[in-house]
Image (cartoon, rainbow, N blue to C red):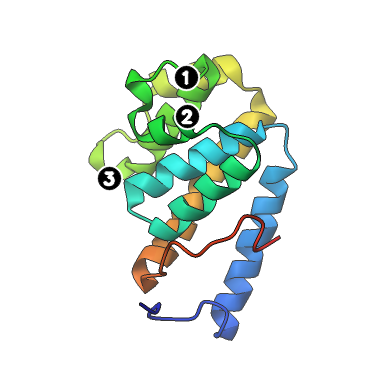
């Protein structure tokens, strides 16, 4: 299976991806815990059906020491006991921020207030940015049908 478009084969796409990567660098350098960043990327990618990003971020998280139990339970985080209250708040914000079209009011005040209990303003900015950015990456990969399964941890570092 080949992607419909090589995102690095077009000057426009290459420029856009470079900006995405720069934005991701700013997020990764923030004080938002790296574990939370990966959980957010995994959950949004699952919701969006992005196999490429789900493959990448589960492998990167495992490579960084995340357990298979937690990785296997991300999709069912509400029923899982292996996530902290802060991670649960981030996952709820991720779900609501990813499923904006499913809720007339967008992200609820309750979800925002819950996240704000655990993350300071800079971390919230990084969290919101991470949610928005992974959704953008997901949409590109889903639209071009980027194949999944061959990613190696650190491949794009």
Q: Position of residue 127 (x, y in %)?
A: 57, 36
Q: Secondary structure at mark 3?
A: helix
Left or right: where does residue 98 sit relative to residue 152?
left
Check the image and report above or below for 81 versus 65: above
Q: Residue 33: name its quadrant.
A: top right
Quadrant housing the C terminus? bottom right
User: Seen in the image, is 119 located left or right of residue 83?
Assistant: right
Q: Position of residue 52 (x, y in %)?
A: 44, 60
Disc number at residue 70? 2
Task: Find numbered disc 2 in the image and state the secondary structure of the residue it sits on.
Answer: helix
Q: Which residue is painted at 50% across and 51% down in the image?
A: 134
**In the displayed structure image, the side of residue 28 where residue 20 appears, left or right:** left
Is 136 on the left or on the right of 75, as rendered?
right
Q: Which mark is residue 101?
A: 3
What percent of the width, then of the height, locates residue 44? 41, 44
Q: Is the residue 9 above or below the residue 89 in the image?
A: below
Which badge, 3 or 2, is on the more N-terminal residue? Answer: 2
Q: Nearer the viewer, mark 1 or mark 3?
A: 1
Q: Which is more N-terminal, label 3 or label 1?
A: 1
Residue 154 pos. (x, y %):
67, 57
**Residue 129 seen anywhere in this rendered image of the structure:** no
Q: Choose between 69 and 141: the one closer to the eye.
A: 69
Asked whether disc 2 touches disc 1, contact meaning CB atoms under 8 Å apart, the reply is yes
Q: Nearer the viewer, residue 79 or 121?
A: 79
Q: Earlier in the sequence, mark 2 or mark 1?
A: 2
Image height check: is 138 above or below 59?
below
Residue with the mark numbered 1: 82
Tell me which residue sits at (51%, 36%) in the image. Answer: 39
Q: Quadrant of residue 17?
A: bottom right
């Amino acid at each position: 299976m080949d992607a419909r478009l090589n995102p690095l084969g077009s000057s426009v796409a290459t420029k856009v991806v470079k900006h995405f990567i720069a934005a991701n660098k700013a997020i990764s350098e923030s004080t938002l815990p790296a574990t939370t960043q990966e959980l957010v990327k995994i959950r949004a990618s699952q919701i969006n059906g992005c196999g490429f990003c789900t493959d990448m971020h589960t492998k990167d998280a495992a490579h960084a020491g995340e357990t298979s139990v937690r990785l296997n339970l991300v999709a069912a985080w509400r029923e899982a006991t292996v996530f902290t209250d802060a991670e649960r708040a981030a996952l709820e914000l991720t779900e609501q921020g990813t499923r904006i079209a499913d809720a007339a009011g967008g992200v609820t005040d309750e979800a925002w207030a819950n996240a704000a209990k655990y993350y300071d303003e800079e971390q919230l900015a990084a969290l919101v940015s991470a949610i928005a950015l992974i959704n953008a990456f997901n949409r590109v990969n889903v639209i071009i049908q980027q194949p999944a399964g061959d990613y190696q941890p650190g491949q794009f570092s």
